[in-house]
Amino acid sequence: MPAFEISGKSMKKIKQKEFKDEAELHTLIDNNLNEIFKIRYIKHEHITKKHGRIETIGLDETNRPVVIEYKKIKQDGQLVQANRYMTWVRQNPAHFELLTTKNIGNHVGEIDFANPRIICFAQEFSMDDKCLALSLEAELWKYRVYDNNVLMIIREEEPEQIIDVEKGKLAIKKSKRTPRTPKTIEEHLEGTSPDLRCAFHDLNNKIMKLSSEIERYTTKIEINYKTSLVFAYLAIKKRTIA
C-alpha cells in the first residue's frame, strides 16, 4: 500500500516504517478503538484458564462482543487463535458480562452473543486465514505505518473460490457473507403489510448494491448494515390496531 504526499501538482512517496514491536501496534489500536470502529474497549491481555490470553476484548455500538488479535507481520494460525478466544466468550457469557460491567458500566443493555465479531490486524494474511475468515465471518485488517506518523488500515479482500460446476465448466464466484442471526428477515417482516414489505426489499437492495464489503446482520430488534462501522439501522414496527 504505497502512500504519497501531495504538494501542488507533485507527489512524493512517503517511506514506510515499522512499529518497534507488536505491543506498540496493540496499544495504539486499543487506545483508538472507538475512533476506528466505534468499539468500546473492555480489557486487554485477559487470561483464561483453558483458552489462553486474549489480546483485546470489546463491545461494538450494537452490543456485539468483539475479540481482537494482533500480529506485527504475517503469521499462520492467527485466526485460529482468535477463534479460540471467541469460543471462550461464547462459553462464558456471564464472565464477559461481568467484565463489561466492571470496565464500561451496567448501562450497556443486552449483549448480542449471537453475532460476535472477530477482528485481526497484521501486515499480511495467509491464504489459510483468508479462507477461514469466510467461514467465521471474521474481519482481517492489513495495516501500514509511515514516516509522517500516518497509519493506514484496509480490510483484506476475501479470496475468490471455485464453488460451482455447471455442464462441466468451473464457475468462479465470490462467496457471500451469511451472518448468523437470532431473528430472520422474514421474522422481522412477519405481520407487516405488502406495501411495507415491498418498501423494505427495495431499500435493502439499494443498500447492498452500494458495495460488496457491506455486511447485513440482524438482532432481535434491528436489521443492521455495516462495513467497519454500522452505518444504517432498520427497525420494523408493527402497527397495533385497537
Image (cartoon, rainbow, N blue to C red):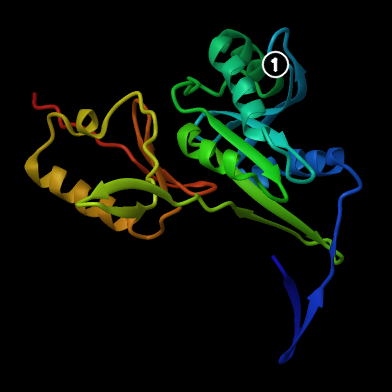
Per the image, the residue denoted by label 1 is 102
Quick check: 193 left or right of 5? left
Q: Residue furthest front?
A: 168
Q: Report the quarter where the N terminus lies.
A: bottom right
Residue shown at 75% from the left, 57% from the top = 144
Establish if 71 lies above or below 63: below
Quick one: 124 or 215, which is closer to the camera?
124
Q: Compare residues 51 and 103 and report the one nearer the observer.
A: 51
- Whether residue 44 is visible, yes or no, is yes
Q: Nearer the viewer, residue 160 or 38?
A: 160
Q: x and y percent of residue 227 in the render? A: 49, 49
Image-based side of 126 in relation to 227, left or right: right
Q: Residue 90, how many percent across, how many down?
A: 54, 16
Q: Give the answer, above or below, for where 33 lies relative to 150.
A: above
Q: At 9% from the left edge and 27% from the top edge, which residue is drawn?
A: 241
Q: Secondary structure at mark 1?
A: helix
Residue positioned 68% across, 14% down in the render: 51
Tally of numbered discs = 1
Answer with left or right where residue 189 lies relative to residue 106: left
Q: Is residue 142 above or below residue 34?
A: below
